[in-house]
Amino acid sequence: EIEIKNKVVAENNAVKAEKSTVEQQKNTTTEAKNKVDEELAALKEEKTQVELEKEKIKDEKSGVEEQLKKEVENRNKVVAEAKALKEEKDKVVHELAQINVEKIKIEQESAALLDAKSQLE
C-alpha cells in the first residue's frame, strides 16, 4: 500500500514537473510570439513611413516636372519672340536698304537736274 502510495506520489510529481515544463514552454512561446508581433508592428510602421516618404518624393518629382514644363514653355515663348523680332528687324533692314536705293536714285536725278540746269544757264 505504501509502495502504491509512493508510486502515485512519484507519478503525481512527474505530472507536475511535466506540467511545469509545458507551462514554461508555453510562456517562452508566448514571449517569442509577443516579440515577433512587436517586430512585425515595427516593420509595418517602417513600411508606412517609407510609403509616406515615397509619396512625398513623388509629389516633389511632380512639382519639379511641372516647374520644368513651365520653364520649357517660357523658353519656347522667348525663342518665338526672338524669332519674331529678328524677322521684324530683317524687314526693317530690307526697307531701309530700299529707302537708301531710292535716296541714291533721287540724289542721282537731282544731280542730273542740277547738271541740266547748269547747262541751260
Image (cartoon, rainbow, N blue to C red):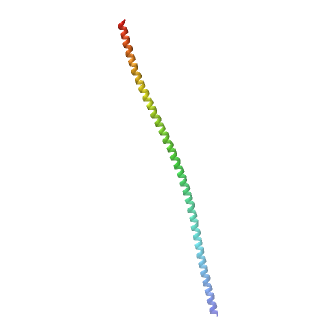
Q: Is residue 60 above or below residue 118?
A: below
Of the 4 image quadrants, the one containing the C terminus is top left
The answer to which quarter of the image holds residue 45 is bottom right
Which is nearer the eye, 105 or 30?
105
The residue lying at 50 percent from left, 39 percent from top is 74
Q: Is residue 3 above or below residue 29?
A: below
Of the 4 image quadrants, the one containing the N terminus is bottom right
How many marks overall? 0
Q: Is residue 100 above or below residue 72?
A: above
Which is nearer the eye, 64 or 3?
64
The answer to which quarter of the image holds residue 89 is top left
Residue extending farthest to the top is 121
Residue 120 position within the rendered picture, expressed as x and y whole percent measured from the top left: 36, 7
The residue lying at 36 percent from left, 13 percent from top is 112
Residue 44 position within the rendered picture, expressed as x and y whole percent measured from the top left: 56, 62
Residue 97 position within the rendered picture, expressed as x and y whole percent measured from the top left: 40, 24
The residue lying at 61 percent from left, 80 percent from top is 19
The residue lying at 45 percent from left, 30 percent from top is 88
Residue extending farthest to the bottom is 1
- Classify residue 1 as left or right of residue 63: right
Q: Is residue 20 above or below residue 50?
A: below
